[in-house]
Image (cartoon, coloured by chain):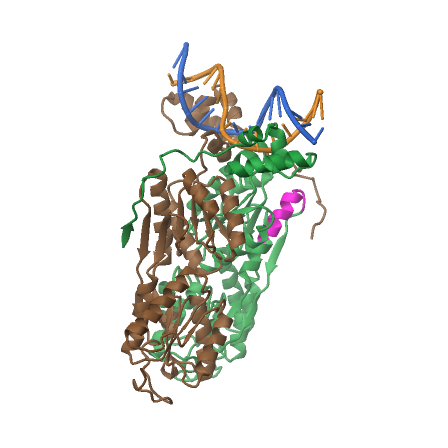
Chain colours: A brown, B green, C orange, D blue
Amino acid sequence: MTHDTHGPVATPPRPVRRPTLAAVAERAGVSLKTASRVLNDEPNVATATRARVQAAALSLGFRRNAVAADLARGGASRLVGFVTGDLANPFYSAVASGIERELRGRGLQLITASSDEDPERERALTEELIERRVGALVVTPTSHEHAALRDELAAGLPVVLVDRPARDIEADTVVIDNRGGVRAAVSHLLAHGHRRIGLVGDESRLWTFQERREAFVETLAGAGITDPDRYVRDGAHDADRARAFVDELLALDQPPTALVTANNKITVGALHALRDRTGAASDRQERSVALVGFDDFELADLLGVTVVGYDAAEMGRRAAALALARAADPGRPTQLVVVPTRLVARGSGEVRTSGSSGARRTDA
Amino acid sequence: MTHDTHGPVATPPRPVRRPTLAAVAERAGVSLKTASRVLNDEPNVATATRARVQAAALSLGFRRNAVAADLARGGASRLVGFVTGDLANPFYSAVASGIERELRGRGLQLITASSDEDPERERALTEELIERRVGALVVTPTSHEHAALRDELAAGLPVVLVDRPARDIEADTVVIDNRGGVRAAVSHLLAHGHRRIGLVGDESRLWTFQERREAFVETLAGAGITDPDRYVRDGAHDADRARAFVDELLALDQPPTALVTANNKITVGALHALRDRTGAASDRQERSVALVGFDDFELADLLGVTVVGYDAAEMGRRAAALALARAADPGRPTQLVVVPTRLVARGSGEVRTSGSSGARRTDA
DNA sequence: CTGTTAGCGCCTTCAG
DNA sequence: CTGAAGGCGCTAACAG
């Protein structure tokens, strides 16, 4: 993989030597400070001097060293850290994109790190970003223990939690209206005649699923369903696992006639399971089991999947805005932003109870 | 939507004051350098001293200042910059994820910036990252002019191009086997009896599309098609535009019987166009127009869409690896990594010529 | 308008 | 094994 250099050995292993501000100043025949003023667009420099410095900088190919500048300024860098679950997951990358968009034009840069939902990795990454002296930290917390974050908050670092709040610290937070979303999903299914409704979720350790589960059970109970958690399953960490859970649910003696899937990955798994069930021709018309998924996804419209949607990028934007607001005013009260959800009916949730079981509200 | 928590207005507007190494040293009763040695796991420190320093650091909540450390070390920071088109696009976020994965464990951090495919923004972001003194730069170039990058390369900064090569600079590059992929797609369609095949692409300015287009035309020409670019369209910057192009193509007197879509967004648009065409029940069985898309996507299997796939995350990994290799050996010859593609047949590309036009290889 | 003097927090010699 | 000095590249006071 590594061959020898041919031709003139060009770049000697020198570690990227660059012209310094001092060099520019010397070339322009001015003091360091004056050069600094020019390159930072500060006032109080004669036009002629300014031009000389600029010319010198240009001819030397000068590039300001932001690292040194931040250090000298004594504060945090113009970097915002984002500790997330997994950049490959569209939800997280949408959030990242939203954060970046909000930072844009303010001279702030985004530095991301994926924890893979591993609490220990999350801690390590947070630590690394703090060492890098980020000016703010946005976190999608996986763990329940945030001692490090508490220290930082106390030290005055803006910390914003996204998607999941933390019990042990008081920080600005952006979450989805999980309960409202699930309530809408379940109500929708109930309105279409379903009484045996299942829920497939990921980790019961995660706050989001806890919320979704509770709202699910409450809504069913409120509708007079006697055994609301009868068809609740958790631990579907990936699409394949979700698929297995759905298969299992549908194989029951009295299988659910409708399903709620707690996130995009699970919805995918469920769709696969349902497809296999109806055979190759998996059109919405032929689906016997109703489905409402949490999280919207591209092509859901083509597949005719009813979902609970929300704006993930907006969550990122709001998170970044909260961080900026706190940086500007450390004393402001912490804020909780709840991003609304909307039920998008596309067919899969509107399938009515029918067929084999012939159940027509005979239960409950 | 936005509630306020109250609580005692705690943090006064101080700019995050932190314990320094000097403070740790003093607390432990040792010199700065000794404390430094301990916290950097350097040898030549008595076990007892080491323990004292560690205790002091812990009790003070000391956190190494990576910014100052990098400055003092005089070199680049342990940051890798990634200038990409748009993090919200799954292709780019997959690449980002791959880069991050490769950096992981080496103490390197990823800092990403989205150009939105705007050359000027790309230039500005590149500049910013350089000012931040990133240790390496990975770029998905949108522009054709890379003067800034050339300077950096000359200065010894590892620069890796991903997805699109640059003519004006010599840098390590990772690309997809675009020609091979398109060749496979077109051959597949030809083998299924199609002679009138269309291509919908994005920007003819982009190298990737140029490659795909040329391979498309060549392959058709090689098969004896007289007018290979008859159904070629470009300028489909988003899914909606792509949809319009497809509608237009299919409205021709002699419409194409098969389509190749040049990227994931265009495939989505085309699917919508085809769905609208066949009415609500858009099952693969009923699709009259064959389709092969470049870029695989989630649920493509459920939708039965035949695609040219490849491993985007792998591209990121390879790019990061190239950057690391060059950092280790600046003199090594530049390398071109071509990531292979594979045709994944799922039904939409296997639709045969038939129906209204009744064309049975009568043309050409 | 311009320059001088001190650091920012840490690491790197090079002596003890 | 340990420490003292010097400096990374830049900015922030204060002078002139």
Residue that appears at 46% across and 37% down: A77
Q: Foreground: A40 or A316?
A: A316
Q: Foreground: A195 or B176?
A: A195
Number of numbered labels in the structure image: 0
Q: Foreground: A215 or B91?
A: A215
Dividing the picture into quadrants, the one containing residue B281 is bottom left
**Residue A110 % position (x, y):** 45, 46
Say if residue B353 shows up in the picture.
no
Residue that appears at 47% across and 55% down: A143
Residue that appears at 46% across and 31% down: A74
Dividing the picture into quadrants, the one containing residue A33 is top left
Q: Foreground: A250 or B186?
A: A250
Dividing the picture into quadrants, the one containing residue B328 is top right
In the rendered view, tell whether residue A42 sits above or below residue B307: above
Is D10 situated left or right of B74 in this image?
left
Residue that appears at 58% across and 50% down: B103
Q: Name the quarter where the C terminus of chain A is drawn.
A: bottom left
Secondary structure predominantly adopted by residues drawn in magenta: helix
**Residue B283 % position (x, y):** 40, 80
- Please check the rendered image and state whether residue B320 is part of the magenta-colored stretch, yes or no: yes
**Residue B240 % position (x, y):** 35, 64
Question: Which span is picked out in magenta?
Answer: B319-332
- Please check the rendered image and state whether residue B337 is part of the magenta-colored stretch, yes or no: no
In the rendered view, tell whether residue B346 sits above or below residue A117: below
Say if residue B96 shows up in the picture.
yes
In the rendered view, tell whether residue A108 sits above or below residue B256: above
